[in-house]
Amino acid sequence: MQGRQHISAQFAAELDGIRSAVMEMGGKVERQIMLASEGLESRDSGPAEEAIAIDRDINRMEVEIDEQCALILARRQPAAGDLRLIISIIKLTTDLERIGDEASRVARLVIKLASAGGADPIYLHTAKVARHVSSMLREALDAFARMSVSAAVRVVLSDKEIDEDYRNGLSKLTSAMQQRPEQVEKLLDHMWALRSLERIGDHATNIAEQVVYLTRGVDIRHLGNERLENLLD
Amino acid sequence: MNHPDMETFNAFIEASKASKTKRRQAPSLQVEDVSLSYPAEPNALQNISLEIPSGCVTAVIGPSGCGKSTLLRCFNRMNDTIDGCRYSGSIFLDGANILSDGIDVTSLRRKVGMVFQRPNPFPKSVFDNVAYGPRLAGIRSQRQLDEIVENALRSAALWDEVKDRLDAMAGNLSLGQQQRLVIARAIAVEPEVLLLDEPASSLDPISTLKIEELIYELKSDYTIVIVTHNMQQAGRVSDYTAFMSGGRLIEFDATDRIFTNPSERATEDYITGRVG
Amino acid sequence: MTSGPLSDFHGEGSVFAAWALRRAGVMLWLTSGMAVSAIVLLIGMLGLLCWLAFAGDAFGAAAGHFPGALAVLSQGEPPYTAEALFSAIVGTITVTLLMSLLVDPLGILVAVYLHVYARQHWYTDLVRIAIHNLAGVPSIIYGVFGLGFFVYWVGGGIDELFFSDSLPRATFGTPGILWAAITLALLTLPTVIVSIEEGLLRLPASLREGSFALGATRFETVVGVLLPATMTSVVTGVILAVARATGEVAPLMLVGVVKYAPSLPVSIEAPFIHLEQKFMHLGYLVYDLTLHAPAGNGRVALIAVVALSLVLVTMSLTTFAAVLRGRFRYQYAQEGLL
């Protein structure tokens, strides 16, 4: 979108700086989810602990990036595209930080489940959802990096599938709970994990919606998937 | 996952942008295909068409030499004072084409007042400065003049500061006060339109803000067109913004839109401070 | 830099000299010295005149003393009488004032036309050059022109139209104070025009634009804004004109000054000013005395007295005008307008 050079090289550098910071934060969050997913698959608490450790970095980055945005607003009075960029980034950091929190929650559950032991196809299903959500986040961040509206809209629409995964998982879990009532605690933990993953999907959708606002200046939040679907099918 | 149909999506986006455009008031000044040249600048204005809405503040922004002051000076025919100036097209004010030959330029200039970049009060007293225009119009009664001068100075937010020294020489006022005096002088003849050519560019920040506040108060009574090279000022003060470059009008829209999401790439580049 | 001001001068003589000049304040001495010399000269000249007029024996037989001058004045025949001196003073003042009355509006009109109304083209520049050149024309030429055009042609025409019953005795077709005033006005017109135009040029264009933007015509702008703002330059022009005019004797000899005029050009009876009369002038009186005064005591003193009168009349006229200008300056004092 911004193909031309800013007259103020310092301003351009500042904008580049926070964009890179956001991408870095996003990368860290992605890694968190991947580690949690690994932990689920291998029922190993090692990756899960690493995922929790990353969360401290993420929180710190949220504060730093928000502060940098406030400074840019105060000193540069950005307008048009630059203004939308700053506003979007402020919202993005919130979403990324929440994703980090949810990923940590999943990681903690992995640690708990790992100690309980026992193989289970349920783990694999949850891990698959985790991978799904992770790729959704990656696509959202990629849409931000490339300022691509089409990629962003794809992400918004794919939230539907995450919701379906979540519903499937829930029904599987409820039937499992009925069949194996002695494992209810463990199964409930899975349910919390699934819930966190579904929330991550929502946050990734938010990020994609912000990308649309950033590139086209139109707010598509709260339009409802149906309306969007009708537009796009 | 389906591949979204981007065409329909784009159409949706354009439609939602359009629905946010403010309903415009009745236009006060209608510019139709105006082109202007003078010896030093053969392409000063090229095929400009726009409608200045009444009762609002319209800002004209653009890089140096883009023709914004030239366009402003078309509205009161001040370009006529430039030797060798030629123009074509029409500008309609209250239904009459002010660029036509038959127009009485002096009475046009009473309807369309102008304030310049550097305050230019006459070397006369404060009172005589403001009374200059009414006296030209033939008003001789001292009582009437007193009333007109007081009203004008009050409207320009200057009365309290000068009411005890109306006989003082205008040159003794501070620059900010002088500029408000010049605004009062322009208002005293009760124009319909006020043209402000970078009115605050030679003032300090506090005086600038006072002038901007004054503009806000004045817009309910006059149509105001302001040329400014200060983008933040355009954002603070105007309802509509016209962006010009190289003698052409690039974009004209509500200020809200121009400053958050302009349609033209050139506008976006200028507003965010990017050059090609 | 560890060096003083001399360290950069590696033997470059002229640079050093320039520096030395500045350090020693030579310019200050030079300029103040010049000013002092000018004042000393002026005072010296006046002093000499006064001394010649009033002091005792100095040049032997040629010199005189005031009693001598008085004696000549009171006992001599016209035009060497006290009344003659008085008549000359009145004549000088009258013709100068008449000239100012004529040159002022004319100068303003021409300067305003050139500056405000005329389209700035090569031919307006040509007119300006012509005006500047006219200032350098020798004054006797103006006298000849005044004689030929005004006295004979215009004056003759007036006589034929209005005073035909007095012919062949000319009323206006002969040198008189009116033609003298007009001739002097023409003589000093270029100076006045230049002065006023300079004043107009110094006015910022924003003043004119501001007036136009309020709906004023060019005429209203000139009368309401431009002229009041350049009053100082108008008065300056008049001062210059007066200073020059009181000193020009040669043209006046052709167009109206006589050795002895029996009556004053101004009087208490209507029409108060007699434009067709010839008059006396202090400058001419000096000339006449030097060549034709009766020999004897008091002659030099008499010349000195007349010369002194001329200087005093000139100085008082210009001083009066300068005081007037000072009042305008105070009234219109504003940044960048003087």
Image (cartoon, coloured by chain):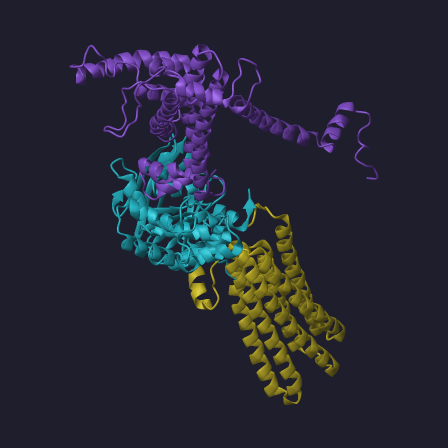
Task: Depth check: give the residue in front, C210 or B92.
Answer: C210
- Residue A86 in the image, given as x and y percentages of width and height: 57, 60
Residue furthest right in the image:
C2
Can residue C125 be seen by looking at this rendering? no
User: Relative to C205, is A40 on the left or the right?
Assistant: right
Task: Depth check: give the residue in front, C173 or A130.
Answer: C173
Can residue C136 be seen by looking at this rendering? yes
Specify the quadrant of the image occupied by residue C13: top right
- Residue C97 in the image, given as x and y percentages of width and height: 36, 28
Chain B shade in the render: cyan
Q: In this view, does C32 lie above or below A218?
A: above
Chain C shade in the render: purple
Task: Depth check: give the residue in front, A82 or B29.
Answer: B29
- Residue A13 in the image, given as x and y percentages of width and height: 65, 52
Identify the residue at image location x=46%, y=45%.
B117
Specify the quadrant of the image occupied by residue C212: top left
Task: Depth check: give the residue in front, B6 or C43.
Answer: C43
Identify the residue at image location x=22%, y=17%.
C158
